[in-house]
Image (cartoon, rainbow, N blue to C red):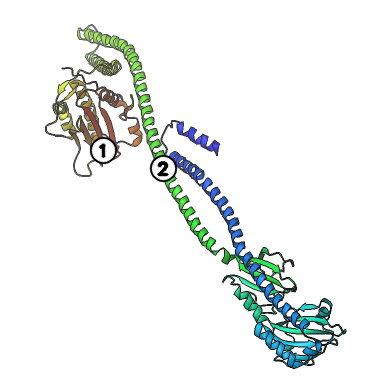
Amino acid sequence: MFAAIKNAFAHLLEVPEAVSPARYRSLRRLMTILMVAVSVTPLLLLSGISHMQYTRTLEREMESPVYALARKSQAALELYLGERESTVSFIAHAYSYKDLADERTLNRVFLSLRSEFQGFVDMGLVNAEGMQISYVGPYKLRGADYAGKPWLRETEIKSRYMSNVFLGYRGYPHMVIAVHRMEESGLSWTLRVAVDTLRLQQVLSSVGPEQETDVFLVDREGVLQTDSRLYGKALDSCPLPLPPATAETLVRNVTEPSGRKLMVASCALAGTDFILLAVKPEAEAFRPWTALRTELLLVLCGGIALIVLVSHLLMKQLVNRLQASDERRVAVFAQMEHNQKLSSIGRLAAGVAHEVNNPLAVIYEKAGLARDLLGMGKVCGESKDRERLNGLLEGIESTVERARSITHRLLGFARRMEANRQSLHIEEVITETLSFLEREAKNRGVTLEMDLAEGLPEIVSDRGQLQQVFLNIVGNALDAVTGSGQAGAVADGQGRFVKVRCVPSGQCALEVTVRDNGRGMPREVLRHIFEPFYSTKKDKGTGLGMFITYGIVRRLGGDIRVDSEEGRGSTVRVTLPLAPPDGSVEV
């Protein structure tokens, strides 16, 4: 990443040869990604760490209510069962076998017991042989034989017994509390009392479990001892794995076979084979946190989206400014390169003009001498040959004159003569210049039009150099509208024309526009139009006209631009200041 950042900023410091939009799109994309990554990564890390810490804390907070509920339910059930067991034990030791064998006495004791304690169903006395010799209750269980029953043997061994929930002779879920007693005479017997499990369910309900929490009892085999809201009625099988039998309350995370996750608190009831389970689905426990997490996730996503949007807009603005700066920098370098080229061409032009002028002078002198000799009759020959020779000498002289004009222009450019500035009216200069070209335009069938605004201010400039500028520009326009390939130039019915217009440009400049409906120029030609010796007129042009025009306009403190579209004509715009750049006025 750091290497990418280094390369990106190194790329920023480069001065491109051409301002490519793809380069800045790539740079904007890279900088946006880096800014988003730097901004979002700490946010995501902080959110992840906070989520884990909060989830752990919430798990502990969710365990506390389930743990407390299990502890309260355990205390309530142990109190209830212990109270019943102690009451039965008290009756067994308060009455003798003879007293309880009398069903009237047994009935009186049972009624007193039910009036004080709820949940007792019936009571019976079992002798040493396992026969229930007396019974009080709604069922016909007198004479029931319990000989050999496991609960009876366990009662005889442990003196007290509390059974699991079962159906038995009664056909509905109940449990038995039995107390064994041996009298001083050696007589042994067992007092057996049935307890309704509905009362156990009521005890669990009275503890006040939460609506989402299910509290119930199971035995060591996983059989329900009370009804369960999640797993069915008493004596149904519980699908949950059983915890270890310990009096300590344990809280575990359990997954059902169906995949539902549960939070289970468990503990064993003292003196019984019962295990108390408090079950709460994690989905219910974490429902408030899930809603909060969804809201936080939406806020996080909204924050990230806002960061991305702001980063994109900031990087777009920054890169656009950078692109504009690079464009200005490229333009400055191009201008410096152009000025350097002009300087080099000027020095070269001075040397070339100087070297060429000397042999041209000799050629011109020799050609003049030959014409003089021919005119004095010093050269013998037929009249026809003399005329031919005279024509050749005239061609030599005209060619030398043309070469001299080219070298004169080169010297004028190389010397970079200071402008002879004076106050003048630009409309007079334009009118005077176009008067020189009226006849040529008429002969070519071109209409010269002028649109000069009224009340134009005076400017301080060089009249002669301005005339040269306008002569070059208008002359090129005449060549453009009358050159080859001009068959479609008058398709609009306007005819061939060159329009010269002058209007104020701001408060400190004038703009002169020369527009024609000629053949126009392609982009490739526009790029080289101000370069020296570049011409599209083949052997008819020197390629110095627009080059010299550009130099004059820049020396006068102005600017020149050319717009052209191939097949639709060209427009040259010359902007001239009202006063010279240095503020001096030469009159």
* Viewport quadrant of the N terminus: top right
Residue type at mark 2 is Leu
Q: Is residue 545 left or right of residue 333?
A: left
Quadrant in the rendering for residue 324:
top left
Viewer-proximal residue among 79 and 525: 79
Give the quarter of the image for residue 190. Answer: bottom right
Q: Is residue 497 left or right of residue 121?
A: left
* Residue type of the residue flagged with mark 1: Gly
State left or right for residue 70 relative to residue 330: right
Please determine whether, in this image, residue 358 is positioned above or below residue 211: above
Residue 203 is situated, as x and y percent measured from the top left of the image, at 63, 76
- For the residue labelled by badge 2, is the local secondary structure a helix, a strand or a loop? helix
Crowding at mark 1 (Cα within 10 Å: few <14, some 14-19, many 20+): many
Q: Position of residue 431 (x, y in %)?
A: 14, 28
Whether residue 258 is visible to the viewer of this picture, yes or no, is: no
Q: Residue at x 67, y 85 (%)?
A: 114
Q: Is residue 554 left or right of residue 285?
A: left
The x, y position of residue 167, in whole percent, is 72, 84
Could you give the CA–CA distance between mark 2 and mark 1, rounded to whole angstroms?
Answer: 43 Å
**Which residue is denoted by mark 2 in the rendering?**
314
Looking at the rendered structure, which numbered label has been put on residue 391?
none
User: Foreground residue, 524 or 507?
Assistant: 507
Q: Helix, strand, or loop for circle 1?
A: strand
Q: Nearer the viewer, mark 2 or mark 1?
A: 2
> The C terminus appears in which quarter of the rendering?
top left
Residue ID at (39%, 39%): 320
Mark 2 and mark 1 lie on one chain; the one further toward the N terminus is: 2
Q: Position of residue 265 (x, y in %)?
A: 66, 66
On the image, numbered disc 1 is attached to which residue?
A: 569
